[in-house]
Amino acid sequence: MSEALAIPATTLVLKLLIEKRLKAAYDTLTPPPVSIAPPPQRAAVPPGPGPAPSPEGAGLYLFLHHVTPNPAWRNMYDPHVGFDGKRMGPAPVVLDLCYLVTAQGADLEREAILGVAVSALTRNAILPRPMITALLGSVSVNPSPTSIHDEIPKAPLADPAHQLESLAISQTPLDIDLSTKLWSALQSPLRPSAYFTVTTVFLDVDETFPAGIDVEKLRLGVWPDTAPRSDLPADNLVEVTP
């Protein structure tokens, strides 16, 4: 089930990476939580006079908002076809994951939280396989899984047999138009944010293709004529059985 766990396992690795850096930055203080949910909407304020709404609690949101096919792998792969032109096997599904990283909190704390998250992702632009193994291994696993969520830490994200390339993290510039559309779709107030892309995530790598059908009977014909014919007489045919 590696194809089902590759995306959530990648998100979990990023979340654990940010949590580790926040814990180090806050030292003896309590670090803010990191959520993979979309940024929340602003709490409703009743009309009329009343107490001012309380400030938002500190927190960071790591939200996967878009998935795109990796252009390099999509263009380089040579599809395997048979003698009749039919595809004999599927091309690997290789994706790039696009994340929104945003922070909330009172006063300047949200900027501090966002800075720590950006630093954590930027300083680990290439995620080594041992680091991925260590991060996923730090999650306690239920010995008796009750849902697919319990299987995510066991995903083979660091196994070269399933992930042919190392995960790479890069900050993505996003113009104001796309950013505005994204925040409008979320129906959430604009917050300090950054955008990151993770490449390349392999959902499956299937290089095993079905064998062709064995030749059961071979018929050879000889006819002294340059024009091709399909109705050769029976006495001009030689049948060869493997």
Image: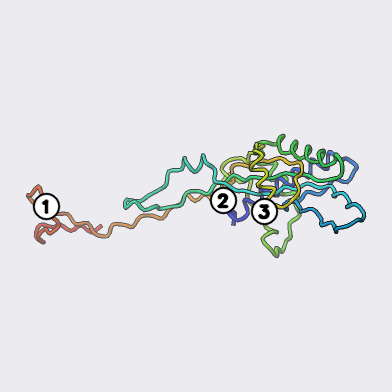
Local secondary structure at mark 3:
helix
Q: CA distance from mark 2 to mark 1?
A: 52 Å
Query: Which of pointers 2 and 3 indicates the residue nearer the eye?
Result: 2
Lateral position of residue 223 relative to residue 48, left or right: left
Residue at far top of view:
123
Q: Quadrant of the N terminus?
A: bottom right
Residue at image coords 27%, 60%: 216
Check disc 3 and give the amino acid type. Answer: Lys
Query: In this figure, which residue is indicated by the disc labeled 1?
Result: 222
Quadrant for residue 78, please give it.
top left
* Front-most of residues 31 and 206: 31
Q: Bin the neighbour count of mark 1 within 10 Å (Cα to Cα): few under 14, some 14-19, many 20 and up.
A: few
Badge 2 or badge 1: first in the primary sequence: 2
Query: In this figure, which residue is indicated by the disc labeled 3?
Result: 154
* Front-most of residues 170 and 58: 58
Residue at image coords 67%, 53%: 154
Residue at far right of view:
51
Give how far across and how far down residue 123 sits, in percent. Answer: 72, 34
Residue at image coords 84%, 47%: 58
Query: In this figure, which residue is indicated by the disc labeled 2?
Result: 203
Local secondary structure at mark 2:
strand
Check disc 1 and give the amino acid type. Answer: Val
Q: CA distance from mark 1 to mark 3?
A: 63 Å
* Front-most of residues 57 and 242: 57
Quadrant for residue 235, please give it.
bottom left
Badge 2 or badge 3: first in the primary sequence: 3
Local secondary structure at mark 1:
loop
* Front-most of residues 220 and 29: 29
